[in-house]
Amino acid sequence: MLGGPPIARRFGSINLRGLATFYRREFVRGMKIWSLTLAAPALRAILFASVFGLAIDRPGMTMSGMPFLEFLVPGLIVVAALERAFESSAFSMVYEKTEGIFSDMAALPLTPGEIVIAYAAATVTGSVLVSAIVWAALFPIGGTLPVSPLALLFFIAAGSLMVGLFSQISGLWARKWDYIISVQTFVFMPFVFLSGVFFSLDELSEGARFYAQFNPVFYIVDGVRYALTGQAEADPWLGAAVCLAVVAVLWAIAYRLFAIGYRYKS
Amino acid sequence: MDTHANESSGPRDSRAGFGPAPSVRTFGLVNWRGVWTLYQREVKRFLKVGFQTVAAPIVTTLLFYTIFSVALEGRVGVVGSTPFVTFLAPGLIMMAILQNSFQNTSSSLMTAKVQGNIVDVLMPPIVPVEMVCGYIGGGVTRGVLVGTTTTVVMTFFVDFPFHSIAAIIFFAVAASAMLSLLGLMGGIWAEKFDHMAAVTNFVIMPLSFLSGTFYSIQRLPEFWQHVAALNPFFYAIDGFRYGFIGQGDAPVWLGASVLLAIDILLFLAVHRMLVTGYKLKS
């Protein structure tokens, strides 16, 4: 009547169905609150552009050889993309932790690599989407058509992947909301705000400039600025290499933490 | 069980071992103990994560300060006759005050609603006026505390003339009362954290960013100057800044009256919500 006994589901070397399901859950979880994940960042970018425009911009003022707002817009796009990337995986994990369902992770038929990929893919799709919306919102203010669409996609994707992996690590570490908000305030925000979103490194003193070039976010902002305006402070190839190297390191850490079930398998 | 009985030294009734029988607690016109208890809870809620409450606004304020001073000051120079950073710093401090007092009351109500323990606030024998006062007390305490710590930190970087301490204190208290009341309203209205986040993103953020923290509203086109003058946050920041540097865009008495009037209106509105049980009692 009921058919045979249940049979084990088989899959090849990659559990594609599991990966796709997990990806979909993560992506939908972010998009369900689209007013906060897509509309709010666009509004925030417009606010920042107006405030900085009014406070700083003067007729004829240039930054790094371009009008100030044109300089600022790529940075604001990156801020929106990275903020979404940081909030995606970590917030989802901490939400599950406070609900007491995060340990279900231990029972997933997914390898650590598949989990990292699924989380990361959802993050990158979300961030690319946000970037597109913020770009469109800022276009009337000081936007430009990308000089190099390929570089634009690369730097947005690599940047959000970098922050997304950092978000996975932070989410695993965080036990409660306080933890993740602290990481956001004390680590993420300083890295992003001091990265050259709002000013060119030429504005800094010799000493400050030395430290600023160790900030990986600088290379993301600079790369996106290069892709949108054709001008950059650092060599875009160097920027791409830095991004990939940081991604590789963070990937290895995230992979390792999922492999040992850090703070969820006891 | 026994230790409890031994510790109580009051009169015993026949139910040996259970201490005195409960009696009705009486209080006068105002349930002071009730208000004080609610106030204490509101303060302890943020002191429990004290490091975060105090350090986060300092970091955020310093970040904005760094961006504007280290990197951009040469380009802006002075606003009126005031160096740009001296103009900016009071605004940044006020932004921290506004954000924190809003967060204190809104998150308190929101958490209670989501976790379902809001009844513990609705059941006790306190009337709506006392309840509002307890919550505002917590929000204002946090706002003033954050304002004080960020001011202390900023004095290391900026040379404030401290024109009028009275104005500084008045505007800090009036503004954090305003935001505590707004937080209460938001907390009563919102059913989920998403709703609250929407209020923060679409109401509080724009009002505080466009309040004249970063620029003098005289830089705006005339039409937008009139619009900016309708933003109550503008008066909070303008008056607070007047206390620090002795100049403002609007007359200080006007700002003070606007804030007082808004505080009273919001108080009445929140009080009305509690009396009718809007979204709290079914």
Image: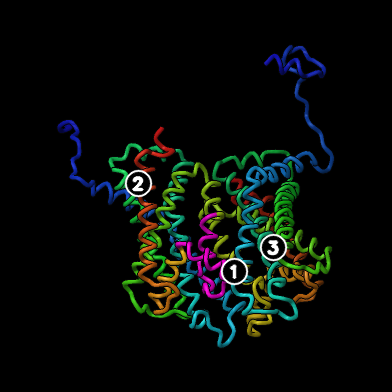
Please tell me which residue is depicted at 33% across the width and 37% down the height of the picture: A107
Please provide the residue range marked out in magenta: A187-216
Which residue position is annotated with label 1? Answer: B67
Which residue position is annotated with label 2? Answer: A255
**x then y, percent, for residue B251:** 79, 76
Q: Nearer the viewer, residue A216 or B58?
A: A216
Q: Chain of mark 3?
A: B
Which residue position is annotated with label 3? Answer: B93
- Identified by mark 1, the residue type is Ile
Q: Main secondary structure of the magenta part?
A: helix
- Identified by mark 2, the residue type is Tyr
Q: Earlier in the sequence, mark 3 or mark 1?
A: 1
- Residue A197 on the magenta span: yes
Binning the other alpha carbons within 10 Å of mark 2 as few (below 14), some (14 to 19) or many (20 upward) gives many
Secondary structure state at the residue bearing disc 3: helix
Q: Nearer the viewer, residue A225 or B1?
A: A225
A178 lies left or right of B214 = left
Q: Chain of mark 2?
A: A
**x then y, percent, for residue A223:** 40, 70
Binning the other alpha carbons within 10 Å of mark 1 as few (below 14), some (14 to 19) or many (20 upward) gives some
